[in-house]
Amino acid sequence: MALTGCYGLIKWLVVLVNFIFWLAGLAVLILSVWMLTDPTFYLSMAQDESSYNTGVYILLATGILMFVVAFLGCCGAYKESPCISSVYLLIIVVAEIAAGAWGYNNRAPLEDSLRDSITTTVKEEYGTVQTRTVTFDAIQKGLQCCGANGPNDWSGSRYNNADKSGIDLTFKSLVQMYRIPASCCTVAESSVACVAGQEVGTGASISGIMYSQGCIDKMIETLRQHMSIVLGVGLGIIIIEALGLVFSLVLCCAIHNTEHRYKA
């Protein structure tokens, strides 16, 4: 039986809300696939590789669930049978609120984790772990930063010690040299100025051709700037989902009352 009047309007509102929810699920799916396939994704620096991949797979599963539930919700509302999808929508809304609250309350530990991860990458992983090297090069270029706290961090990194096997007792070793990655250059990496600026003596001043600010502060600053946008979008999605849930429940009651009236 077709719903008319206000209930007919609510039916199409439920379809619209579920369609928006479906688009949000599709966006989460695309984002999670991008995070899995793009080794230069900045947030991969927030954790070690295994934890990062686990989190992305959870995000992927959430996107698939949102995509399927929203599709069922659209079909259910159109066929005037939205009750089952309302249960799944309620579960997702509660889970998203819980996840958002957890993330907001754990901002400081997440920043500490980011600091530790970047420091470990610079000191231990850069030049030895390919994925972390590619990611950190992209971060240094994109955020115009160098090292964890500055270019001097590279002097004690494994990147500069990986090829040293033994003790050099020559006169040249009296002046210890270390190399700064080309991704720290403010000019083209292949330029003469960049190549010359990469070689630095311990204690010597670093060429102005290199970025001077560390990547820890740059990344935290960037994440804080975008946090309000992320929170705003997340809050908007939750409000839309909550409205969809309310409309779905109203529609369920209307369908139930209409069926009961016809049977009577």
Image (tube, grey):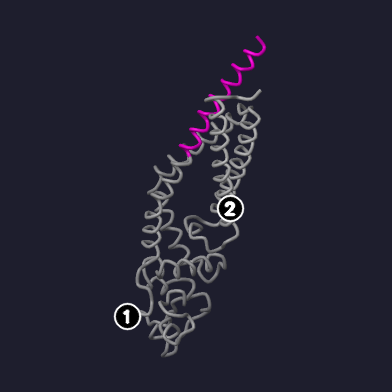
Residue at the disc numbered 2: 30
- Tag 2: amino acid: Ile
Say whether disc 1 or disc 2 marks the residue closer to the N-terminus: 2
Q: Is residue 150 left or right of residue 49?
A: left
In the image as oriented, which residue stretches furthest toward the bottom? 171
Q: Position of residue 92 (x, y in %)?
A: 54, 36
Q: Position of residue 179 (x, y in %)?
A: 44, 79
Q: Quadrant of the C terminus?
A: top right
Callout 1 touching callout 2 (CB < 8 Å): no
Residues drawn in magenta: 238-264
Give the residue drawn at x 38%, y 77%: 210
Residue 75: x and y, percent? 65, 35
Look at the image and tell me in which quarter the N terminus lies.
top right
SS category of the residue bearing label 2: helix
What is the chief secondary structure element of the magenta stretch?
A: helix
Q: State which quadrant residue 88 falls in.
A: top right
Point out the residue furthest to the front here. Answer: 5
Quarter-of-image position of residue 63? top right
Residue under the point 57% across and 52% down:
32
Question: Which-is-in-front pick, marks 1 and 2?
Answer: 2
From what the image shows, is residue 70 above or below residue 195? above
